[in-house]
Image: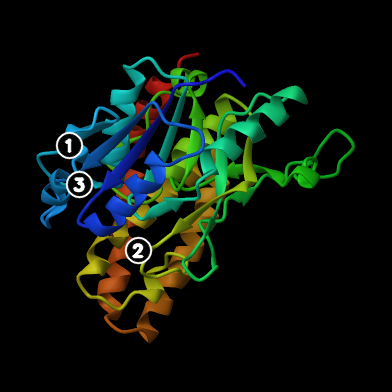
Amino acid sequence: MEKKKVYAVVVTYNRYKYLLECIEALLTQSYALENIVIVNNASTDRTEEALKEKGYLDDSRITYLLQEKNIGGAGGFYEGMKYVSEQDYDYLWIMDDDTIPNNDSLEELLKGESKLISNGENPSFLASSVFGENGELMNVPVINTYDSKNGYPFWYRYLSDSIVYIKRATFVSLLFPKKSVDIVGLPCKDYFIWGDDYEYTQRLVKIVGHAFMIGKSKVIHKRKNPQTLSLFKVNDKERLNNFYLLYRNGLINKIYYDGKKAAIYQLMKDVYNVLRCLTTKYPFKRMKQIIKGDFKAIIEYHKFKKYIDNQIKK
């Protein structure tokens, strides 16, 4: 296999212990990285001090991008990917700071791509299989259930190779070929958090082509709460303040990729969710997040649509 230049992008905010573990795992990959780009979202803990103590800020294998303020995961990935897009690279591998790849995670992604290319595929991106610290299934990509020419779904065509077709995924160990980034541009930084990954990966599948999860490429996601993200599973009053972004970004994605009918159906579900809030702790705060998010999605949709459309090089 010809040696490819792979840049990793890791976005971090106030989780330096996980970050150090992530960096160590990246530096010891069986397939050596060209460079590791760390985007520090203005952490207020001792992240920078810890990086200095480990010598990482003087390591030629590491690029450090310190932001003036917290620009969210979306902004962090935008800045990291923008930096890499200006370098001489072949692949871009992105993840959160609490993602700990196995020693062969990158190698298996590249092997999977090679297998797919030999079968006539042209992957837009590849995703690792993600597990929690105790083996929980996490960040499971959405399988592409579209029908093949004879009417049957084709998602399991490469199942014997531990590979399945997917249509969207989260930014927890995704590998993008350079040509994909060249075609679809960069993620939408104004999403701030949540939904930027689904938007970007759907953009890739829509514009570039099929995407795949490589089952043999495994990573551990050390997120404190291994459950799926839900307004109804959070009881931290302060954390609830950002949940309108989940609804805003989700509805924008629904309108752009699934159409107005699907968006109307989503709004109907959200009416039910507003009523459901009445049975929870902090009911009116939760209700506000849904209503505010959906309202902002409708008002701001064309701004985001314009950005996405302008990123795509047709």
Residue 247 placement: quadrant: bottom left
Q: Amino acid at mark 3?
A: Lys
Residue extending furthest toward the right: 150
Q: Is residue 250 above or below residue 5?
A: below
Q: Position of residue 227 (x, y in %)?
A: 46, 70
Q: Amino acid at mark 2?
A: Ile
Left/right placement of residue 140 relative to residue 170 reads right
> For residue 290, which numbered disc appears in the image?
2
Label 3 neighbourhood size at 10 Å, few (<14), some (14-19), many (20+)? Answer: few
Q: Which numbered tag is attached to residue 57?
A: 1
Residue at left offset 52%, top offset 46%: 169
x, y (%) of residue 120? 75, 22
Q: Hey, what amino acid is under mark 1? A: Leu
Residue at 46% from the left image edge and 67% from the top image edge:
133
Location of residue 110 in the rendering, given as x and y in whole percent from the top left corner: 59, 32
Which residue is denoted by mark 3 in the rendering? 54
Query: Which sits earlier in the primary sequence, circle 3 or circle 2?
Result: 3
